[in-house]
Image (cartoon, rainbow, N blue to C red):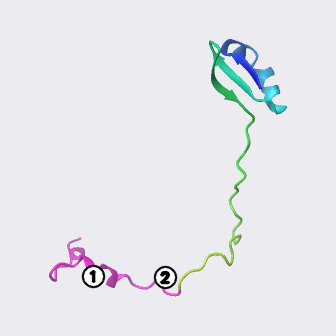
Amino acid sequence: MQTVNIHEAKTNLSRLLEAVESGEDVVIARAGKPVATLTAYNPPRNKIAAPGGMEGEIRMAEDFDAPLDDLFDCLKQHGDDPLDQL
C-alpha cells in the first residue's frame, strides 16, 4: 500500500490511477495523517433479474383482488364510518 501526500496525489494522479488499476491501494495523507484511500472501482455484482427470472418463487393468493371492505370495520365508532367523511 502506497502512501502519498495531497500535493503529490494532485501532481501524479495519472500515475497513481495506473497503480490502482494494477491492484495497488493508495492512501492519500495530509501532514502524514491518512485522509482517503484510492482503490479500484468494483461494479456491483447484483444485477436486475430478467423478466420471468423468479418464476416459481413468487406466489399470488387466489383472493389477492378480493374487496377490503370488512378490513375497515375496526375504524367504525358507534355506527359512524369515518370513511364516509372522505
* Measured Cα–Cα span from mark 2 to mark 1: 19 Å
Q: In this orientation, which residue lies closer to the viewer: 83 or 73? A: 73
Please rate how many residues cluster around mark 2, counting C-alpha atoms within 10 Å: few if below 14, some from 14 to 19, many from 20: few
The image quarter containing residue 67 is bottom left
Labelled disc at residue 73: 1
Q: In this orientation, which residue lies closer to the viewer: 27 or 62? A: 27
Residue at which label 2 appears: 64
Q: Position of residue 47 (x, y in %)?
A: 70, 56
What span is colored magenta in the figure? 62-86
The image quarter containing residue 57 is bottom right
Q: Position of residue 15 (x, y in %)?
A: 81, 21
Q: Position of residue 25 (x, y in %)?
A: 76, 29
Identified at 48% across, 86% down, the residue is 63
Membership of 20 in magenta stretch: no
Query: Is 15 on the left-hand or right-hand side of 86?
Result: right
Amino acid at pointer 2: Phe
Amino acid at pointer 1: Asp
Labelled disc at residue 45: none
Residue farthest to the bottom, as pictured = 62
Secondary structure of the residue carrying tag 1 is helix
Which badge, 2 or 1, comes first in the chain's sequence? Answer: 2
Q: Confirm or deny contact between disc 2 and disc 1 (CB under 8 A).
A: no
